């Protein structure tokens, strides 16, 4: 029990939940709880209220919505209210107030903790410290393992580690369902964003590609995160499938219609960067694409029909754009 308390209490020893509590308050609580543990007093006798949280990061928005209790998550970022940028279900996002992250808004909400990304200006960090708001900076997850660690971190912060473990079990189950058949060869897949942008190999989408039966086409050719892969390279060395994350002229170029060995499918850009529950949707989508590449998929030139919230980046023939049904 003492060992367990040793992992939990440091969080509260360095936070001032409720705002304005004396600095020595949590030291006293920690000392009392440790003494209680030594006398075999049940840990449940140590009482504290769960912290109130404001999330300014669209990736933490989705995780915190899963691991907090009602009324604990005071607000989410405005990104999560935009279907084009959100990592959350729009209906779920509408359950929470949204903020643009201004200091005035945060002061009005009076949270105990502000969760943001790692690129927070030093002046903002200093302001949080002066106001007594704890800051939790959440980096971008590069692997599923990173995501699991972030979920556990935020769930512990919220005071509900069991909710974090439940979310992790759901993610692991989704990845198991989306895994390719044993021994199946990896399918070269190009994740192509507007402007020819491609992901590097040490990214979450690259990890998900591997777990769902694909090989990162651009990384295998030496391209890193946010590098540009020209259309000419794709035409000279085409992948098995192009996952069109967004749409622009390069993704719908007429020349692609002549690459009969390559299929194209839409991939919601919102699935590329956030981890947590977003992994469940991303894994299901990638598995759907992989299964459609089998011998029974319906071809339409270099495009094929798959259900998706985004329109397919269509092939162009005879001056007309041909799109598969969404």
Image (cartoon, rainbow, N blue to C red):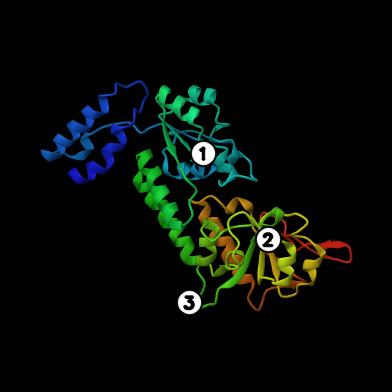
Q: Mark 2 sits on what residue?
A: 229
x and y percent of residue 256 in the render?
Answer: 77, 67
Front: mark 1 or 3:
1
Quarter the C terminus occupies = bottom right
Between 169 and 241, the residue placed more toward the observer is: 241
| Badge 3: residue crowd in 10 Å (few <14, some 14–19, many ≥20) | few
Quarter the N terminus occupies = top left
Q: Secondary structure at mark 1?
A: loop
Between 158 and 11, the residue placed more toward the observer is: 11
Tally the numbered discs: 3
| Badge 1: residue crowd in 10 Å (few <14, some 14–19, many ≥20) | few
Q: Is residue 1 visible?
A: no
Given the current orientation, which residue lies at the most extreme front position? 222
What's the residue at 49%, 79% (across, down)?
183
x and y percent of residue 66 in the render?
Answer: 45, 45
Q: What's the mark number on residue 70?
A: none
Q: Secondary structure at mark 3?
A: loop
x and y percent of residue 109 in the render?
Answer: 48, 25
Q: Mark 1 sits on what residue?
A: 119
């Amino acid at each position: 029990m003492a060992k367990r308390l040793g992992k939990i209490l440091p969080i509260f020893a360095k936070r001032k939940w409720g705002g304005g509590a004396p600095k020595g308050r949590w030291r006293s609580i920690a000392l009392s709880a440790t003494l209680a543990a030594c006398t075999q007093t049940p840990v449940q006798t140590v009482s504290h209220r769960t912290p109130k949280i404001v999330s300014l990061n669209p990736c933490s928005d989705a995780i915190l919505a899963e691991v907090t209790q009602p009324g604990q998550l005071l607000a989410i970022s405005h990104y999560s209210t935009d279907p084009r940028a959100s990592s959350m279900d729009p209906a779920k996002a509408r359950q929470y107030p949204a903020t643009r992250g201004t200091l005035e808004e945060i002061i009005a909400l009076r949270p105990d903790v502000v969760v943001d990304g790692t690129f927070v200006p030093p002046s903002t960090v200093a302001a949080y410290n002066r106001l007594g708001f704890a800051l939790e900076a959440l980096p971008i997850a590069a692997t599923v393992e990173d995501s699991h660690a972030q979920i556990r971190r935020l769930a512990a912060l919220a005071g509900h580690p069991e909710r974090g473990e439940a979310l992790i079990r759901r993610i692991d189950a989704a990845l198991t369902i989306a895994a390719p058949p044993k021994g199946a060869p990896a399918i070269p897949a190009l994740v192509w964003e507007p402007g020819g942008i491609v992901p590097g190999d040490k990214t979450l989408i690259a990890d998900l590609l591997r777990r769902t039966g694909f090989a990162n086409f651009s990384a295998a050719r030496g391209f890193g995160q946010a590098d540009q892969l020209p259309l000419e390279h794709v035409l000279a060395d085409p992948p098995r499938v192009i996952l069109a994350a967004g749409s622009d002229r390069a993704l719908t170029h007429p020349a692609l219609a002549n690459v009969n060995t390559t299929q194209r499918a839409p991939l919601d850009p919102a699935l590329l960067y956030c981890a947590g529950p977003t992994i469940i949707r991303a894994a299901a989508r990638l598995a759907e694409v992989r299964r459609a590449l089998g011998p029974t998929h319906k071809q339409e030139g270099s495009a094929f029909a798959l259900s998706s919230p985004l329109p397919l980046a269509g092939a162009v023939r005879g001056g007309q754009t041909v799109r598969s049904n969404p």
